[in-house]
Image (tube, helix red, strand yellow):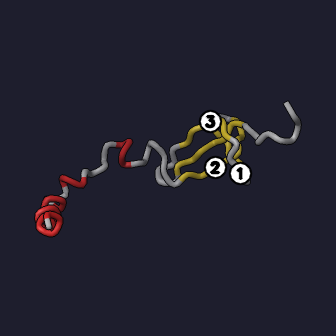
Amino acid sequence: MKEGIHPDYREVLFVDLSNGFKFVTRSCVPTKETDTFDGKEYPLFKLDTSSESHPFYTGTQKSVDNMGGRVERFRNRYAKTAAK
């Protein structure tokens, strides 16, 4: 392989800031901070959300159809203008 043209692909520690969940995976994301995990020091990348905190993956996401009939009221209100 040619030297100097490939990204720095290494193990990186990702931290979910909403709940503190940490996991290590390989990535070439640029980082400036480091942190320790399982006794080893890794480059640190902070996430706003991960699969541990996202409502879709945790099962806490609400369906739009179940929000008090708002979708049905919208459809009923604008059904007449759409038919014209």
Residue furthest top in the image:
1
Q: Quadrant of residue 70?
A: bottom left
Whether residue 31 sits left or right of residue 57 in the image: it is right
**Which of pointers 1 and 2 lies earlier in the amino acid sequence?**
1
Q: Is the Cβ of the residue at disc 1 closer than 8 Å to that at disc 2? A: yes
Label 3 element class:
strand
Judge whether 66 appears above or below 2 on screen: below
Where is mark 2, residue-wise?
45
Where is mark 1, residue-wise?
31
Judge whether 18 appears above or below 51 on screen: below
User: What's under tag 1, amino acid-wise?
Assistant: Thr
**Which of pointers 1 and 3 lies earlier in the amino acid sequence?**
3
**Nearer to me, 11 or 21:** 11
User: What's under tag 2, amino acid-wise?
Assistant: Phe
* Residue visible at 62% across and 36% down in the picture: 25
Disc assigned to residue 25:
3
**Percent x, y for residue 26?**
66, 36
Q: Quote the CA–CA distance across marks 1 and 2.
A: 6 Å
